[in-house]
Amino acid sequence: MRRAAESCDRSLTSDLADIEGLAYYLYRSAARPGLNAEDLQLILSSARRRNQSLGLTGCLHHEDGLFFQWLEGPADGLREVVALLEADERHQDLLVLDQGALQHRRFQDWRMRFSDRDRASLMDWFAGSDSSTVHRGDYVGGVVAFMMSVTV
Ligand SMILES: Cc1cc2nc3c(=O)[nH]c(=O)nc-3n(C[C@H](O)[C@H](O)[C@H](O)COP(=O)(O)O)c2cc1C
């Protein structure tokens, strides 16, 4: 069985710098302590506004104080948003899980789909799967497979 991360059509470089077409960026971060529902709504509304104007799509999952986000779209726009994300103090400890060139969008209908533990749990998904949370490739593939399995 092909894992989701392996099916991301990667370019030779995993960096976003040299990509001209579609690209993706997957990361995990920790929500700033005290971040509340209102803060989250502000993040989502400005994210969706900018994503719409740059042609970006993707999903954001929030669980146990962690964010997991998949962003995809034209590499130029993606680089612009990644720079904003990296400077955003509403989250910290941003860890890039994967990035690269992409052939086809995975979340084309979503300016930024949002899910949380009430909708679906990544931890429960891992507990019920064969994917390891220890091996990086498995972990990244598991996160992507989970995101693609969520119905909102
Ligand atoms: C967890 C998280 C996810 C975010 N996702 C996006 C996003 O998908 N697109 C986006 O433009 N900004 C996103 N942002 C917000 C940016 O970091 C930045 O604050 C925002 O784009 C600034 O836009 P504004 O000047 O319209 O408020 C996110 C922020 C956080 C904390």
Image: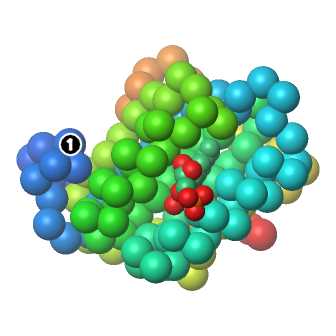
The residue at the point 34 percent across, 57 percent down is 80
In the rendering, at what x and y percent does residue 4 appear? 43, 52
Against 94, is 10 above or below? below
Q: Is residue 105 visible?
A: no
- Secondary structure beneath dot 1 equals loop
| Residue 6 relative to residue 114: left or right | left
- The image quadrant that residue 152 belongs to is bottom right
| Residue 97 relative to residue 126: left or right | left
In the rendering, at what x and y percent does residue 37 appear? 88, 48
Label 1 CB less than 8 angstroms from ligand 1: no
Q: Is residue 114 visible?
A: yes
Which residue does the numbered mark 1 point to in the structure image?
A: 14
In the rendering, at what x and y percent does residue 131 appear? 55, 33
Q: Amino acid at mark 1?
A: Ser
- The image quadrant that residue 109 belongs to is bottom right
Residue nearest the observer in this picture, 85 or 98: 85
The residue at the point 51 percent across, 78 percent down is 52
Quarter of the rendered structure image containing ligand 1: bottom right
In the rendering, at what x and y percent does residue 55 appear? 41, 78
The residue at the point 37 percent across, 45 percent down is 83
The residue at the point 71 percent across, 28 percent down is 32
Residue nearest the observer in this picture, 26 or 51: 51
Residue nearest the observer in this picture, 142 or 57: 57
